[in-house]
Image (spheres, rainbow, N blue to C red):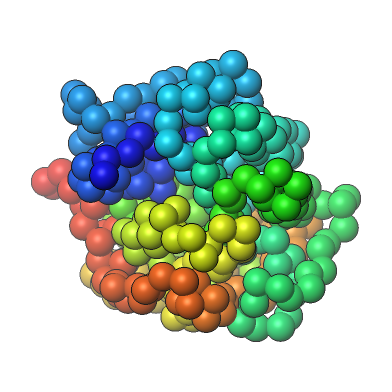
Amino acid sequence: MAKRFLITGGAGFIGSHLAERLVADGHHIVALDDLSTGSLRNLAGLAGRAEFQLVRGSVEDEATVNILLSQCDAVFHLASAVGVQLIVDEPVRTIRTTIRGTEVVLEAANKYGRPVLITSSSEVYGKGIRVPFSEDDDVVMGSTRHSRWCYAYSKGIDEFLGLAYHKQYGLSVRIVRLFNTVGPRQVGMYGMVLPRFVAAALKHEPLQVYGDGKQTRCFCHVGDVVDALVRLIDAPAAVGQVFNLGSDEETSINDLAQRVIKLAGSRSVVEHLSYEAAYGQQFDDMARRVPKLDKIRSVIPFNPKLNLDQIIRAVIDEKQTEAGPR
């Protein structure tokens, strides 16, 4: 049966892919975005579709969110700060948008009895060293003197808020911790590593690796992530729960850089840059970030379809298409 979904951050990288998927499934979508980091270009494929509406506005605007949620069946709350560079440069914006936006969405969802899916982040694991990360693991956060950690703290508060609304009011809430979602439409200007590497490789410029490059991450294609989000919003067993969502194919940033160079047929070299040089301040990084996926697989069928090389090729193809013939 067709539903009407609200997607906050619907013009963003993940939000736009989610909107396309839900429209393709026969649903109606309202995307709320202030376009501060999202882009109209991300929604070009939905332009003119009767099933899609874009509302330009802030998720912190109570009146707007209340009106939209009163007219929708459920909400995917994706609106948040984007990327390490933005978090380091604009900590006030990061904290305010992340926490206040979630407060507004939960208040409205509770008022109208609308199910909510909140996207959180693997950042909430802080300096945890027990790998792979499990949803109920204890966490260790860095000092509040370093703005780098404000996003992790803020997302942790988001999770507490969501679970509190479920416990106290019975609101249908599910929380998803995303691990390095990548793919077409992601931009590198906020510090996202894969599009940054690909853009440099296609220009045969040095790929700047921050730190020693031995830190490891797991990259999951946005299509696989969106498929899981769509399944989770309809899964009764997901209500009141927190889930890791991502790939468990672990790779170092050094290896990622070399793969990008090889697959792009590039003459680029790898250049290591200190965190201080990259961000202009001291920066605590996580040595490994690997999700344990048993819990999400107990609720929905989840097995990423694209491996890392396929993901890299997809991003390269997109960037080459954007650049046009040479």
Q: Is residue 260 in sight in this rendering? A: yes
Q: Position of residue 132 (x, y in %)?
A: 61, 82
Please report the residue visible at 82 percent of the width from the left and 52 percent of the height from the top.
146
In the current view of this chain or complex, which residue is farthest to the left? 325
Please determine whether, in this image, residue 19 is positioned above or below residue 247: above
Front residue of 300/312: it is 300
- Which of the image's four quarters has the N terminus? top left
Q: Position of residue 26 (x, y in %)?
A: 21, 42
Q: Is residue 85 in sight in this rendering? A: no
Please determine whether, in this image, residue 109 is positioned above or below residue 175: above
Please determine whether, in this image, residue 39 is positioned above or below residue 299: above
231 relative to 78 in the view: left or right: left
Front residue of 274/157: it is 157
Please report the residue visible at 27 percent of the width from the left and 48 percent of the height from the top.
21
Number of numbered discs on residues: 0
Q: Position of residue 308 (x, y in %)?
A: 35, 74
Which quadrant of the figure has residue 122? Answer: bottom right
